[in-house]
Amino acid sequence: MVERKIAPGASAERDAYYRRISQYALAPLWERLNVLLTKEPQVRSTPFHWDYDLCRNVLFESADLISAHEAERRVLILDNPGLDGASAITENLYAGWQLLMPGEVAPAHRHSASALRFILEGDGAAYTAVDGEKAYMRPGDMVLTPSMRWHDHGHEGTEPVVWLDVLDLPFNRNLGPIFLDLYPDDRFPDGSAPGTTRARFGRGLKPVALPSSTDPNSPMFYYPYEEMRAALVASASESDIDPVVGHKLEYMNPNTGGPALATISTFLQWMPAGFSSQPYRTTEGMVFSIVEGEGSLTVEHQGQETTYEFKPRDTLVVPCWGRQRWDVRSEAIVFCASDRNIQEQLGLFREQLEGSNH
Ligand code: 1HN
């Protein structure tokens, strides 16, 4: 195939013309086409590694500065260095570390953006209430607050609790329909007893009267680590390991069989000690939270290769079309959130294994 480049020449006459038409809010496509259309993705987000142990002190300093109540949510945003303070970790996802101290509450609200929290530290004494049903959160648990569901957080114990928040906020904002309602009281009134939703929807049964199409988000909002881990370990012992991802399971909406959230795909990945993954890349922007194990993640992105040493509770990001390779020293379990489902639903998703051209 002949290489064709779009690079029109400059001239004083052309420049004068561009200035003249700009007063009508018009611009020449031919001067911009090489930025708008690139042979391969050129995203602004960069790979990055947030070392939890390195940042934990400054995170905890925030508790002296502001209460969770005054802050509404006391969170340090994981600002992707390539995105100029846009409050985004990838092009479509927001992420942050949220700290809740004993006795604190984060007041009830609801918003159009869907959220998940993945618990990093704590002893099960803090909860997220979704429409008044509490889920007590332990490290490794995932709790969802899908679009427009009332949610508040509270802490009934003695040890600080930290979790990773991931929201589809940049995607939601780009589309336009951002909405927020503040509940008039701190707490949404008590709803069902803890565990009710899991008992109803997490047992392989679904209500016949509930059409699968009514809500693309999971009715089940609590995915406890103990059970997710057991599923992963069972898969690992019963099926062959994939040379690219090890064993990787997706959190599912039991009502549709689709992803737990329509806009944020979520996964739990297991890799054995000594595993060196075959490199691959996808068009997802991926956010990783290390649950167990240590090793390194090597990312090649736009011609630059970087290796990050990871350990539990670290957060890492691999942007769209970044090539990743995992080298695992001790048995690792890694949580992943990405925009994969958005891309798949729209027919935009691609992946590429080493050596293949598809
Ligand atoms: C939010 O509602 C939470 O509920 C966390 O914990 C982070 C970031 C932006 C907008 C809303 C929460 C958030 C958020």
Image (cartoon, rainbow, N blue to C red):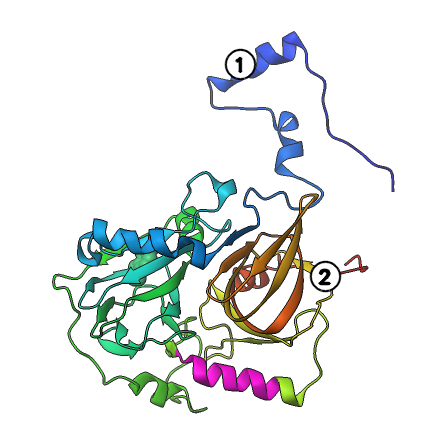
Left or right: residue 54 versus residue 283 is left
- Across and down, in percent, residue 222 comes to 37, 78
Q: Is mark 1 on a helix, strand or loop?
A: helix
Q: Please tell me which residue is depicted at 27% across the width and 73% down the height of the picture.
A: 127
Residue at the image position 32 percent from the left and 76 percent from the top: 123
- Residue toward you, 124 or 141: 124
Highlighted magenta segment, given as a residue range: 223-235
Residue furthest out toward the left: 185
- Look at label 1 and name its amino acid: Arg
**For the point 17% across and 68% down, which residue is it?**
103
Depth check: give the residue in front, 167 or 268: 268
Magenta part, dominant SS: helix
Position of the C terminus, as image quadrant, is: bottom right
Could you say which quadrant of the image residue 143 lies in?
bottom left
The amino acid marked with disc number 2 is Pro
Viewer-proximal residue among 266 and 127: 127
Residue 324 placed where, x, y %?
A: 66, 58
- Residue at 72% x, 43% y is 39
Name the residue that disc number 1 marks: 19
**Distance from label 1 to label 2 (Cα)?**
47 Å
Is residue 315 shown above or below 187?
above
Where is mark 2, residue-wise?
279
